[in-house]
Image (spheres, grey):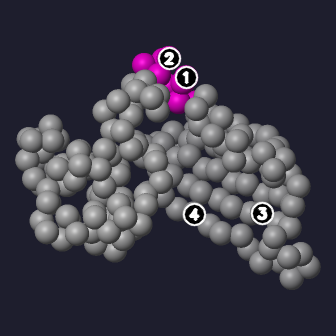
Amino acid sequence: MDEATAPVEDADRPATERVEVSRRVTADGRTITVHATGDGQRVRVQLAIQDAEGNEAGRLNGEIALADMTQAGQTLAALIGSVAVAVGQAKPSLGLDQLRQRHPNAYRPWTDEADALLTERFQAGAPLVDLAGEFGRKTSAIVARLVRLGLLPPDHPQTDAQLAAYLPTAARDDKVDWI
């Protein structure tokens, strides 16, 4: 379960000067709640984790300058991911250079020409795994782009984990057409 709330309007302050966002995710019996509030300069972030019985399993609180939110978020996510790898809860991820050895266009911007060719090839019935090879991208990136172009429905599995659960076993090895 994943819930999110948006900023609440305050008649005394413009929305651009105020931030209030909450998000709650429940998975594997644990609930993670993140709440951020602040003004146009600083944001207070509170993260709480509860186990299935409602007991506190973790807490993180702090303030971040609004101008630093993007970099701080990326850095914190990378740090937590590294800790998860170090304690054996996650596999190490590939660096961009390593990823591009297998998928040369990974994380490169899409061009209008590539969008047009992808649309043409998809509408002609090309298998997604073939499109991934032709465009030098992961299958999940091809699916995400097709969703963005309106050629697949928004609820179509997009992430690697969603695609793995969605695909037959043989397709997970990129050996069959699965769309």
The mark that comes first in sequence, 3 or 1, is 3
User: To which residue does mark 2 refer?
Assistant: 86
Marks 1 and 4 close (CB-CB < 8 Å): no
Residue 116 appears anywhere in the view = yes
Q: Is residue 64 above or below residue 154?
A: above
72 inside magenta stretch: no
Between the residue at mark 1 and the residue at mark 2, the CA separation in whole angstroms equals: 5 Å
The mark that comes first in sequence, 2 or 4, is 4
User: To which residue does mark 3 refer?
Assistant: 19
Kindly indicate the quadrant of the structure image that contains residue 4: bottom right
Kindly indicate the quadrant of the structure image that contains residue 56: top right
Q: SS class of the residue under badge 4? A: strand
**Residue positioned 28% across, 64% down in the render:** 117
Marks 3 and 1 close (CB-CB < 8 Å): no
Residue 51: image x %, image y %?
51, 39
The mark that comes first in sequence, 1 or 4, is 4
Q: Which mark is residue 4?
A: 4
Q: SS class of the residue under badge 2? A: helix
